[in-house]
Every structure is written in C-alpha cells, then in structure tokens.
Amino acid sequence: MNDKWWKSAVIYQIYPRSFQDSNGDGIGDIKGIISRLDYLAKLGIDAIWLSPVCKSPQDDNGYDISDYMDIDPMFGTMDDMIALIEEAKKRNIKIIMDLVLNHSSDEHRWFIEAKKSKDNPYHDYYVWRDGTADTPPNDMGSVFGGPAWEWVPKLNQYYFHQFSVKQPDLNWDNPKVRQELYDMINWWIDKGVGGFRLDVIDQIAKEPDKKITADGPNLHKYIKELTANTFSKADLVTVGEAWSANIERAPLFSNPDGSEFSMVFQFEHICLDQQEGKDKWDLAPFPFVKYKQIMNKWQTQLHDKGWNSLFWDNHDLPRVVSRFGNDKEYRVESAKMLATALHGMQGTPYIFQGEEIGMTNVRYDIEEYDDLEIKNVYKERLAAGYSKEDIMNSIYAKGRDNARTPMQWDSSENAGFTTGKPWLKVNPNFIEINVESQLDDENSIFNYYAKLIRLRKEYDVFINGRFEMYLEDDEDIFAYSRTNDNQKMVVICNFHDKELDMPLKDETAGMKVLLSNYDEASDKLRPYEAIIYIGE
Ligand code: TEU
Ligand code: CA
C-alpha cells in the first residue's frame, strides 16, 4: 500500500492572503509565498494546498471564483503562479490547487450571461426555479445564514446558492457545465500542478426540490466522470472535502481503484464540541472519549479500503492549540502532543499555516473581524435575542478569522507579514510566538514538527501500520499502536494537564523512545506529555 507518493506525504495548507505580503498592500500574495519556500522545505513538507488564488471579487476570500483560468491581481499574475510551481518543484514541493466547483462567483461571465434571460445559452449553467417575489421555492437556508434562494425580478426566477448570495450554485446536471470544468482542470494539469483539493465536492449533486444538498443521488456518478476526464491522466493527489462523508461512504470517495479521489477530507471529529442538533456556534465541551471512538472507527474501518486526511484545523476552523490543547501555560507541550497524536495515525497529515509554531485563537472586537460568516452570525443572533457576550464567546471559540490572522514570522512590526496595514489584525502575541524565535531552538514546536515529518519518511509503520487503540474509556489518555510486518509503534498522549501514572508499561517494555515532548524520562505521564515508542 506504499505505492502512492501522497500516502507518505505531509501537506501544508497556505491561506494566501494571510501568509506573506511582498508589496506592502497588506495582503499576502504569490511572490510572498515564493519567498518563504525555503522555510517550508526546512519544515520538510511535500506539498502545498493553496487556498484559492483565482480571480475573485473576494466575497468569501476567493471561494467565489469569477475566472478559473486567471489569477487574482491581488495575489499576482499567471507568471507568478508558474514561477511558484517551478520554484516549489526545485524544492520537491508540489502545488495543490483549490478547486471550487460547486459554485462560481456571481461575477463569473457564465452567471452574468445566465441572468440576462431564460433562453441565454448559459442560463442552465446555474440552478433556477420559478416563484413569486415573496414566495421562494422552499425554505432552504444558506450555510452563511439567510435563505438559499435569491430573487431575480427580471427573470421572475430564483437562483439557488448554498453559500453566500454571491456564490450561485453551478448546475452539475448540465453536461456542458461539467465539460467546461473538465477543460479548465486539464488546462491546470498541463501547467504542472501536483493535485487538487475539491471544495465541498459532496454538495455538487444537489436536488433542491427534494431539499438535498450533500450526498445527492448522482454524486458518485459525477465524481467518477470528473476523475475519468481529468485527474486519472496524471499522477496527481486529489482531496475531496466532504462534510457529509461517514465511514460507510468514505471508501467510495477514496476508492483505492482510483475512480474517485486519492483521499477524503471529513469532519466527524471536528463537529463534536457543539450541542447536538445545533450548529457550531452552540458550544459544548469536547467529549474526549467520543473523539477517541471516532478516531478508532476511522482508523480501523478505512484501513485498506480507502485513505483519510489527518487534520486538526484549517482556514475554516479555530486554532488547534486553543481548541483542543492549552494555549496558556502548556502551549508548547500541548501543541507538540496534538501533533504527535495526529501524525502517528494512518492517513495523510495536513498542517495549517502557523500550526507548526503554535499560533493561537484571537479575541477581537466585532468591528475588527472580516469574515462574512462571523458578521452574519453576529447580526442574526443579535436579532434573535442572544446576548452580545454569548455571541462573542461563540465567535472567540469558533470564528473562522481565528485561523486567518497573518502568519507570525518575527517580532518586528506586523510580525514580518507586511510593511503595510494588514487586511486582518495580527494576533498581538506575535512578539512571543513567531517563526524566527523557533527556527534555531531545538525544542521549538517548529523543530518538533520537522522531526515528526522526518520520522514519517524513515519508518514505514507510520504509513502502513495497522491501528489498535488502548485504554478506550480513559478520560485523559489517547494511546494506540501501529503494527506492520517488521515494526510496532506505540503512541501515548496525555490530552489534559493532570499528571498521571505512566500507562502501558508492559506494552512498551523493551521498546525505544522515538520521540517525546519532554526532555527526561519519568515514571509519570506529565501534563500534555506525548511519547512515541518503536520496537519490533
Ligand atoms: O467550506 C465548506 C463549508 O461548508 C464550510 O464553509 C463550513 O461549513 C463553514 O466554515 C461554516 O462554518 C468550504 C471552504 O473551505 C470555505 O472556506 C468556503 O467558505 C466554502 O467551502 C464555500 O466555498
Ligand atoms: Ca500583497
């Protein structure tokens, strides 16, 4: 099962507008990324998942594309993009593009045409329904709040948008739409990209009349057709973002026969710290034992049947160390522990920019946030009678801008991100938490991540070992083994700040410590301690 390069790869996600600005306009750009490639090579990553850089009015920070075959001037030019692909290649790093195929921007030329008239050739590129000004086709809502239907008086029709009103859904039932998208993807493949991440791909086969969004009846038919016409022609990595994927359907998305994607990117473990049946803003404590059950299920049941992505955070999620670790007195220990727990499992690990230095969540005034989702939930919940304090607490915990504050490179003004005014305020803790202070510190979070990545390349068992969990009901410890034909690895992680008796001594007797986040050995499992043992 080690045949595919992406199984032993580590993928680093860049959110371009927040990574590195090169021209002082306060917005990260492609030239900025190029200037930091040596840093990423030092970390040891194999590929960069680049959040969208295509032309976009930036209503949803690039996830609303108005031209799939051009680069947004804010990020640079097509020449810059080609240079990025080439410069990355020199360092053995592949570039993974973010494909947003469920919807386009309302400023895409297809949509501009589509709304001109019902018999315009592009009309059927989108999802329209008749109705009257005050009666939408049904009561479906958009992910970002408000209705999923937008009235266009000139046509006496509504168009469907699962996300913002500036993100009209593409009509995948129209073969012309599918063909246009395949042509565009093949054009990118010819430019030398290493793969694609497919945004909300489980939502393309929507059937709004039946109120179906994710996982529509035609979904896997469309994905198979997409892959056969594009990705299957080259040795690419493809990652399907699928909020609806469960363990039964994940083997389809990531079928080892290559008919769909290389791997699935699913969220079951991410939706645990919210109240049952409500949404992410309705906070609940993290149910640790439940989390372990979910990991155990995915690790054991997908083994040999598909391939999973391993991640704690991304540009839509809070910072891992603030969410599942301790961003105060044990920030360094808990960041390393969380990395260990994740990288030890089977699947392809993702590192979201800044995670490798332990960047944390922020608490800003509402005016200081930028994300449309934060602004919408604030308005909606205020109108619904929630207290401001309540709403802000939800935003501090779950707001997407937690992940989007500029990368903290050094302790100079604006953390070395820009010489201008950053588009989103820099986290004030950049003086303490930044790349520069960690590069030469052997014990830094950065160097711990670099070690983890190196070990993954050295020991096959990280890639193909069978997973077995220990101590299922333990409220503090996540521990498991990975075993292949010639090696066994045991991973022990303390998820809390309690000091515990060292568990599993019989299991680990005679094994050697491969990695640990504390200096000296001890009989106790210290707060947020993580150890990887290796043996035969
Ligand atoms: O995210 C899919 C998605 O459903 C999330 O937006 C999530 O539900 C949201 O963060 C609410 O908490 C993808 C992208 O990752 C996201 O950035 C885009 O906004 C979205 O698709 C639309 O393209
Ligand atoms: Ca810039």
Image (spheres, rainbow, N blue to C red):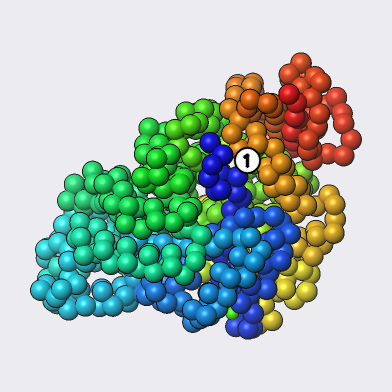
Residue under the point 24% across and 58% down: 172
Q: Between 478 and 45, which is closer to the camera in this rendering? A: 45
Q: Between 96 and 59, which is closer to the camera in this rendering? A: 96
Where does residue 144 sit, x and y in percent of width and height? 38, 59
Q: Is residue 381 visible?
A: no
The answer to whether residue 36 is left or right of residue 216 is right
Where does residue 297 sit, x and y in percent of width and height? 49, 28
Residue under the point 71% across and 56% down: 43
Residue under the point 56% across and 44% down: 7
Q: Quadrant of residue 286?
A: top right
Where does residue 450 sit, x and y in percent of width and height? 73, 51
Instruction: State the count of labels.
Output: 1
Quadrant the C terminus occupies: top right
Name the residue carrying label 1.
342
Q: Is residue 1 visible?
A: yes
Where does residue 517 sit, x and y in percent of width and height? 79, 40
- Compared to 20, does 275 lie above or below? above
Q: Quadrant of residue 234?
A: bottom left
- The outermost residue toward the top is 506
- The outermost residue toward the right is 520
The answer to whether residue 398 is left or right of residue 483 is left
Q: Amino acid at mark 1?
A: Leu
The answer to whether residue 421 is left or right of residue 150 is right
Residue under the point 56% across and 48% down: 5
Q: Secondary structure at mark 1?
A: helix
Mark 1 neighbour density, 10 Å: few (under 14) some (14–19) many (20 or more): some
Q: Is mark 1 within 8 Å of ligand 1?
A: no
